[in-house]
Amino acid sequence: MDIYTRKRIWKITLSILGLLIIGLSLFYTNLIVGKFAAGERKNVRLWADAVQRKARLVRYTESFFGQLQEQERKRVELLANVYTQLLDEDQLEYDFFLDIIRDNNTIPLIITDDKGWILDSKNLDFKLDTVLRLSGKIKAEFTVYEPIVYQYLPNRNRYLYYKDSRFFTELKDVLSNYVASFMSEVALNSSSVPVIITDSTHNKVLKFGNLDDIKMNDPIYVESKLEEMADENRPIKVNFGDQGTSYIYYQDSELLTIIKYFPLTQILIIAVFAAIAYLLFSFARKSEQNRVWAGMARETAHQIGTPLSSIMAWLELIKIDEGNVRQATTEIEKDVQRLEMITERFSKIGSTPTLENEDIIKILKDSITYLRPRTSKKVKYQLNFNENNELHIPVNPSLFSWVIENLCKNAIDAMSGNGLITIDLHEENKSVIIDISDTGKGISATEQKAIFNPGYTSKKRGWGLGLSLSRRIICDYHKGKLFVKNSTIGKGTTFRIILKKIILIKDI
């Protein structure tokens, strides 16, 4: 199966998996949203029921006050009848009627003649010393209700003016405050239910709550909102007695509306996020591929350039002096072998190389022998192991020597072509450890995490492929490890390679 077929299968698999995850997420979200919505609707219904019950209580209270007012009216009529009876000479039960008059300690009364002259008064909260005639502010207070007329003489009447008792007035104030409090509690409810209270015409807004103050100043918005609320819930009719009939419009709370549209919002957010992530991933992948391709091209040119330059130099030397043919032939053969090795290296990138038991000490020694004459004389090499010993482990010589060259070239660049490169080698029970140290500028802790990424480089003219290829060769092909053992800014860096002495078939 080629890479493009596998890639297509992976895309289909990931797409199906992604859709499955999104579907399960949306299903679970809808389940939770449904529970929240049910709870919120229950709260709204409970609130509406509470408003209905409280509205009935207000109506009952109004009815009670109406009955109380009617009773006071009857008491005044009784008093008027008592005064009439007292004027009847045939009436002998004066004490009974006088008791009725004395028992009136609450209802304010004023009795006048036909011309409005005050003859008597009772239960007033002011003095009548200077007042002889009913007029002005006092008359306005006592003419809220029609006066009761009773006959004084055959051709003359008297008028009994009265107003609500202080007790009834205080109770009425309590009722007014109760109604105002009821309206405020309905409008500014703890359930966050949007509410509009109108008068009996459904046009004038008396109070509103949980709505935008600025928008509520717009008549068109108010009309539209009332229609919207009426479509959702039937307005609650409330009778406030003297204040007339009012209607309470309401709808689902803002939280419930948000919960309703949350799944759709979630889908949109996931879609936008997925699109942005895909675009960024594609851009990053293309950028990385471009850097890798550019790096491979430059690495190829760099690898081939060194032996080709050497061959061209020897050819020029032969032209000048044919006596150097033997030496030139020997060196050209080395460069040709080098080109063959380079070809072998690049041919093995992307495929699984064959590992054979090779002498790792000889590979290290040959690599340094090749590098010494091709680097600055200011760069010194120190091998801290016995070069005459042999140590055979599974390794691919051409690829492993490439790793050593890359690490040494990085060390040379870090030392700016002047310093010491030290190579240590020691054995453990199941592995061989190789440390390559330099006296360069060091690597910061932040850079240590990124130096092995393809395309990453701190050099102005680098292409960031050497360390990435080196780790791929050691970790993927040789099942070993390559990492920064330690690094100190201004003092140098040590790279460590760990190779297994035996690689099992399952490891490959």
Image: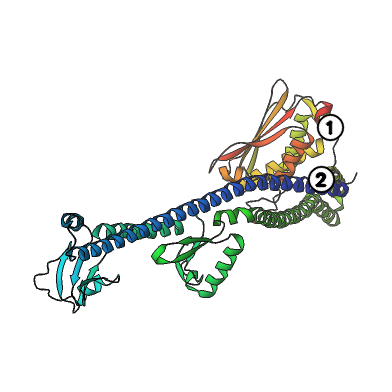
Q: Give the residue displayed 22% in from the left and 66% down from the top.
A: 84
Amino acid type of the residue tagged 2 in the rendering? Thr
For residue 147, which numbered disc appears in the image? none
Q: Is residue 209 visible?
A: no
- Which mark, by number, is residue 13? 2
Label annotation for residue 355: 1
Percent across and percent down for residue 146 are 30, 72
Q: Position of residue 49 (x, y in %)?
A: 52, 51
Residue type at the position of mark 1:
Leu
Secondary structure category for the residue under label 1: loop
Image marks 2 and 1: residues in contact by CB distance under 8 Å: no
Residue at x 38% of width, y 55% of height: 64
Above-or-below relation of 126 to 435: below
Instruction: Give above or below for 228 relative to 190.
Output: below
Side (left or right) of 348 relative to 377: right
Nearest the viewer among 298 and 43 is: 43
Q: Quadrant of the C terminus?
A: top right
Q: Locate the N terminus and report the quarter of the image it occupies.
A: top right
Outermost residue to the right: 1
Q: How is the image coloured?
A: rainbow
Which callout, 2 or 1, points at the residue further toward the start of the chain?
2
